[in-house]
Image (cartoon, helix red, strand yellow):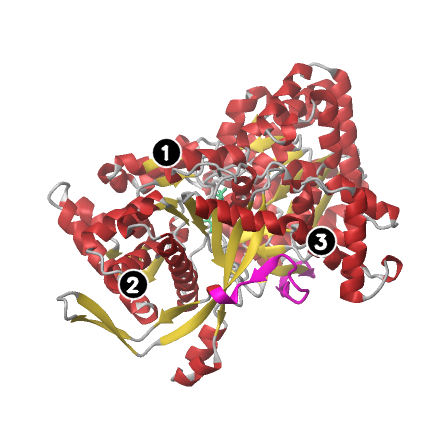
Amino acid sequence: MKVTKKEFKEKFEKRLQDRFAISIEDASSTELYETLGKVIKSYYSSDWKHTRQDYLNHEQKQVYYFSIEFLPGRMLKSNLLNLGMLEMVQEALVEWNIDLEDLVQEEPDMALGNGGLGRLASCFMDSLASIGMPGNGNGIRYEYGLFKQKFVDGYQVELPDEWLNQRNIWEVRRESKAVDVHFGGNVYLKESPTGQLKPVYEGGYSIKAIPYDTGMTGYENDTVNTMRLWSAEVTEEDKINFQNFEDRKELENLTSVLYPDDSNEAGLRFRLSQEYFFVSAGMQSILHYYKSLGLPMTEMNKFIAIHINDTHPAMCVPELMRLLVDEEGMAWEKAWDVTTKVMSYTNHTIMSEALEKWKISLMKEVCPRIYQIIKEIDRRFVEEWSHVFDPELIERTRIIRNKQVHMAHLAIIGTHSINGVAKLHSDLLKSVVLKDFYTIYPDRFNNKTNGIAQRRWSQISNPLLSSTLDKYIGKSWRKNADDLKLLLNHADDKKVYADLAKVKKENKKRLAQYIKETKGIEVSPDAIFDVQVKRLHAYKRQLMNLMHIIKLYLDIKENPDLDITPRVFIFGAKAAPSYHFAKSVIKLINETANLINNDASINGKLKVVFLENYNVSLAELIIPAADVSEQISLASKEASGTSNMKFMLNGAVTMATLDGANIEIRDVVGDDNIKIFGLTEAEVYRYYNEQNYNSADIYNNNPVIHRVVNAFIDGTIPNSRMEGQEIYDSLIKYNDEFFILRDFMSYCEAQESLDADYKDKARWGKMSLTNIAHAGHFSADNTVRKYAEDIWQIEPVRKG
Ligand code: GPW
């Protein structure tokens, strides 16, 4: 898109005048933001239309990415960047004395997701468009996004995220594409005049699903894909049919809130209804589209691919069966063949508490026909395989077991591809968690290591680094992140180290300013910025990070002359509102922060900052300022991690266990440029197999650990007696589920070694540079390209 500054300014002024009848000088930031959004939209709207038309004209195979979460954050700058207008608009606004950053702040951070899973979906949307692939998102338009977090007396308090109060300028409501989704009632099968069994529905409710479409702009390629989010609406007409008030309220509010649990099973009826709602609405609209092509139903898999992002949308399988068999009259076997060819599934966790299961009784209540279809899929699965494999193995892999519907089993049996999100994770799926399924369907299993939207996590969040890179390696990396490798030509250039260090320092100043403003804490940009930002979860071990801080604190108290580089420990993390342990960890970190930050005898050597309300926008501020990236989950627990990739791209050095994608980061940067510590996954499994982990032994025999753990109960950390006791018990009485005590000394050693490396400017410069240079390996452009080739069989758009 080539738009001159002059054209832009004229258009902007006209829009502002048409909409608000004012001139630039009199406009508020809100008015300016809204106008800018409208102008940007007008620039991509014809490309949006053409993209859709191109797909249609060429009968292009498209993928639909079903995800119960999308976490795009703000879109203003990414749209400007993608349209090639970012610098021009920045300049134009400056000529009017307007700072683009002020307008950016006006946009609500769109947080329709919890963490990594939702953010990955949004990174994929960005990359699909940017490599010109026909890919659409399908999800839920929650009226309230993930709660806003505040701290009161060190405790987390949750406030509603009313993001739609300000209008969402990017979405387009498409009334004409609305569909009905049916819930509840009874269903029985009746023979039709043609001899077919047809379902007859009795009672139940229909609600309207209204799609809101958002254009997903590609990077400088005129492609604009669609993210379609569904909103539930109950019409006046429908209201009459509700038998009771509860049902009505529940369905009316179906898309009002996002469940705030990350990697944890929700298990409530309402959540199941949400899942069926966006699955059914999405599948129906895809089928409408496909039918408009006038192609044979049996060839759907040549034109449509549907991806199930974790198991939340796994009902896509029975829903497509319902549409093909019940509505289109296709024979079961044919429909099953098409369905499995269309569907593919990504697994994002091996942790059993996060594997979705639904009570049969609940599913019968919410979507009775879907339950019947699942039962039939299950019956045929047993029939097909129990003669081939050990019947016990088949029993273990059934979809319906112990009065529950196992969604992962449904997703595996009903798709042609199952992938994990990092090499280790995919291996563990095959060898442990889904071993039985791997026996049955070895060809379905594959790995797709996660990736990140490189442009957001460099060009948008770190413009200083971006221009420094341009200076040394040219601009090609901006489109093709693999070209970051060109930086290796300067691997030993001290001038480059110094330039990169200068950029880092500026970013640290920017963050220090924010910390000062929001928390009133003074931090020095000369200190090491050591960062752990991610959801608060026991397995991610924020607690171990805290214990290291406590150790340093006690060490300095004992020896005020201790030679350590000053460090600022920065946390950002939301805890699920019902996750008691996680909330206690937050309280303890906050109280420890108070203690340390206000202890003058520490001499500013340590600072602890827990930033409130971590979200995508805050990540864009924090990550460019990090020296150290904390990726310290117990080996085998973190499926991949993706912030690890963002930090690396921004030149931070990773403090890492051999878990998830950390392993692949080590493989590309080499052992010298990452700090590895802790148990390997094999060692963790050895403890499980031999059942001989004993945290109390470690506690009793290691004086360093003893002292740190005691700090939780001996009054060292103020105002946290109950929380301290709870943490202590988790470590000692309940045998330290995530082996923190086992990894602790190794963690401390790695931290000491990191301190020494940091002191050596050249050494650190090289580590940082090497990380940036290899970050292109984790570009979501590459990841999505592999999905496209191996799983979806889609190709870039043929234009025109
Ligand atoms: F439990 N992940 C997440 F697998 O953010 F469903 N939320 C979730 O509910 C789940 C996984 C689920 C994360 C993984 O924990 C993380 O390791 C991974 O990088 C990310 O998904 C994207 O694959």
Residue 346 lies in what quarter of the image? top left
Residue carrying label 2: 370
Three-letter amino acid code of the residue under disc 2 = Ile
Q: What distance separates the C-alpha of mark 1 from that of mark 3?
A: 48 Å
Q: Contact (CB < 8 A) between labels 2 and 1? A: no
- Element on which disc 3 rests: helix
10 Å crowding of disc 2: few (<14), some (14-19), many (20+): many
Disc with the residue nearer the chain's start (2 vs 1): 2
562 in relation to 36, above or below: above
Q: What distance separates the C-alpha of mark 3 from that of mark 2?
A: 44 Å
- Front label number (3 vs 2): 3
- Front label number (2 vs 1): 2
Q: Nearest the camera: 2 or 434?
A: 2
10 Å crowding of disc 1: few (<14), some (14-19), many (20+): some
- Element on which disc 2 rests: helix
Disc with the residue nearer the chain's start (1 vs 3): 3
Q: Nearest the camera: 25 or 421?
A: 25
Drawn side of residue 327 relative to residue 193, left or right: right
Residue carrying label 1: 427
Magenta span of residues: 151-176
